[in-house]
Amino acid sequence: MRYTIEDGGRLNNFAIEPKMYRAEPPTKNQQRTYIIMGIGGAALVAVLMYVAASVS
């Protein structure tokens, strides 16, 4: 348990913090996947804007 008792008898609880780690840079395969997903997302937004404009 992570708690302390102060002089007045009050109980203080502390959150358990996760261990820190360094982020690894994305690999070439991950970078390619991110680019493809970005292009797909941009295409989806463009199609939705076209449909919204053509309906109104």
Image (cartoon, helix red, strand yellow):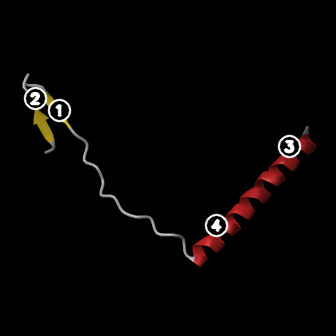
Q: Residue at horizontal 55%, vertical 75%?
A: 27
Q: Residue at horizontal 30%, vertical 54%?
A: 18
Query: Residue under circle 1?
Result: 12
Element at badge 2?
A: loop
Query: Residue under circle 2?
Result: 6
Element at badge 4?
A: helix
Q: CA distance from mark 4 to mark 1?
A: 44 Å
Compared across the picture, whether 13 is left or right of 50 comes to left
Q: State the residue in front, 7 or 35.
A: 7
Query: Residue under circle 3?
Result: 52
Q: Amino acid at mark 4?
A: Tyr
Q: Residue at horizontal 62%, vertical 71%?
A: 31
Where does residue 32 sit, x and y in percent of width and height?
A: 65, 73
Q: Are marks 4 and 1 in contact (CB under 8 Å)?
A: no
| Lower position in the chain sequence, tag 3 or tag 4 | 4
| Lower position in the chain sequence, tag 1 or tag 2 | 2
Query: Residue under circle 4?
Result: 34
Q: How packed is label 3: few (under 14 Cα within 10 Å), some, or many (20 or more)? A: few
Where does residue 6 sit, x and y in percent of width and height?
A: 10, 29
Mark in the foreground, 3 or 4: 4
Element at badge 1?
A: strand
Compared across the picture, whether 45 is left or right of 53 comes to left
| Lower position in the chain sequence, tag 2 or tag 3 | 2
Does 19 sit above or below residue 17?
Answer: below
